[in-house]
Amino acid sequence: MQDHTILVNFSKFPDQGMKNIIKINKVINSFNKTIYVEGDKSLSIRWVLLSSLSKKTSVAYNLLISDDVKNAIECIKKLGAKVKINKKKCEITGVGFNYKIKKDLVLNAGNSGTLGRLILGLLINYENDFKLIGDKSLSKRDFSRVSTPLKKFGASFSSSKTLPLIMKGTKNPKSIKYFEKKGSAQVKTTIMLAALKSNGITKIKAAKSRNHSELLFKYLKVPLIMKEYKKYDIIHIKGINRIKPLNYKIPGDISSCSFFIVLTILSKNSKLLIKNININPSRIGIIHILKKMGALISIKNRKKYKGEIIGDILVRSSKNLKAIKCPTKYNSSAIDEFLVIFLVAAKSKGISFFKDLAELNQKESPRLKLGSKILNSMGIKTSLSQNSIRIYGKPDHVVPKNVLVHKFLKDHRVFMMSTIAALTFKSEGNWIIKDLDSVKTSFPSFLKRIKYLGAKLN
């Protein structure tokens, strides 16, 4: 796999002319705060797409206004939906199951694999060719994982492996049987959305993954039968021709929350309460993993909201962290959080081992490889294979040099992981982390929250 990261000593580099960067030369001081984080990205994008299917008006509060969600809104506007949005709420009036689409349709998913894949399922019954494009990072990602099942429904593709992708739907999508083996919620949801517009009952056998779509379908009273087993789920969906509006107050995103969880764990004498977070069991692998490593995390005020479980997460500084041989059963529910979990492993006593993580390299950047490189640049030893990593922890480690992080395909999670590393590992040098605009993809207020907790950023 191509190397997209360069990590070098920059001590001889001048600062002049360097834009879109942060410079960090001091760990964060102790803090005791309460914060909120923005709306869950997975739910925000799903809300936008499902709302476009209802002829009535859907309303969302705390919608994540990130680049990924903005791109989703622009896509459904091209499909005929009407959108009103302000700081308090977003209203979408959809057009039903048959979109009002102009010829020569081009949809831009930007950086979002969720948007890019799911919208193909929505357009299964569109009979003309349309083009799907994305940014440089998304254009490297595998779309055959969704084009393969969509072909079974009756779609055709003149290109189907990577973007730009050209698809043509079918007037009468047929129901299918499909085994989703990768544990990808994106693939599963793409099939589920296509199944809504199909004739008959679509039967999906799916390896365990996030279940936001199933919960939303149940709330919307979509004809859905689901049976859960240890390693996979069986889902039956009957095609329909209309859907009710979806009014939703979107809870905070556990993936965004994870960076502050790890910041608190690795900081001295600190305490943080993060309010109103989506703690769906299919998303909290990071909490299970970190508690096994000795982290002080608890969940308060649990409640159920439209199928999802919401709660407040209380985190304290955690000493005497221990290494972990991470159970693979948590891989799917922590897939977006492993980069910051690796930081905790680097500060733990012993050798941590994580395996079956090839899916990490199918994200916005090859995250497994980049996570290892960043740790190496800090002086942390790792042993890396195509799908596993060993991390040799050093609880009292001091980064011995200056570190520059750039050329990481502007992956928002790589940027945020590097920022947390710089704020929690003492260093004899400085950190320069480029492409700070990358956080606009998923967490535009990330740096604002970091500064609120007392971080000094230059």
Image: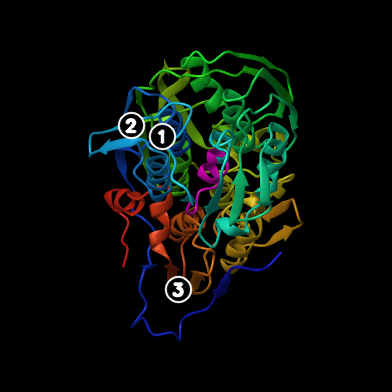
Which residue has dot 3 on it? 429
Q: Earlier in the sequence, mark 3 or mark 1?
A: 1
Measured from the top left, where is residue 302 in percent x and y? 42, 19
For the point 50% across and 69% down, the residue is: 406
Which mark, by number, is residue 48? 1
Q: Which residue type carries mark 1?
A: Val
Q: How is the image coloured?
A: rainbow
Residue 293 in view (yes/no): no
Displayed quadrant of residue 33: top left
Helix, strand or loop status at disc 3: loop
Residue located farthest toward the left when viewing the structure as drawn? 87
In the image, residue 456 above or below residue 347: below
Kindly report which numbered mark, 3 or 1, lies closer to the viewer in this rendering: 1
Label 2 with label 3: CB-CB less than 8 Å: no
Measured from the top left, where is residue 318 in percent x and y? 49, 41
Label 2 with label 1: CB-CB less than 8 Å: yes
Q: Earlier in the sequence, mark 2 or mark 3?
A: 2
Instruction: State how far apart marks 3 and 1 are (Cα).
Output: 45 Å
Which residue has dot 2 on it? 92
Residue 119 in view (yes/no): yes
Helix, strand or loop status at disc 1: helix
For the point 34% across and 81% down, the residue is: 17
Helix, strand or loop status at disc 2: strand
Packing grade of label 1 (10 A; few <14, some 14-19, many >=20) is many
Q: Earlier in the sequence, mark 2 or mark 1?
A: 1
Q: Which residue type carries mark 2?
A: Ile
51 displayed left or right of 145: left
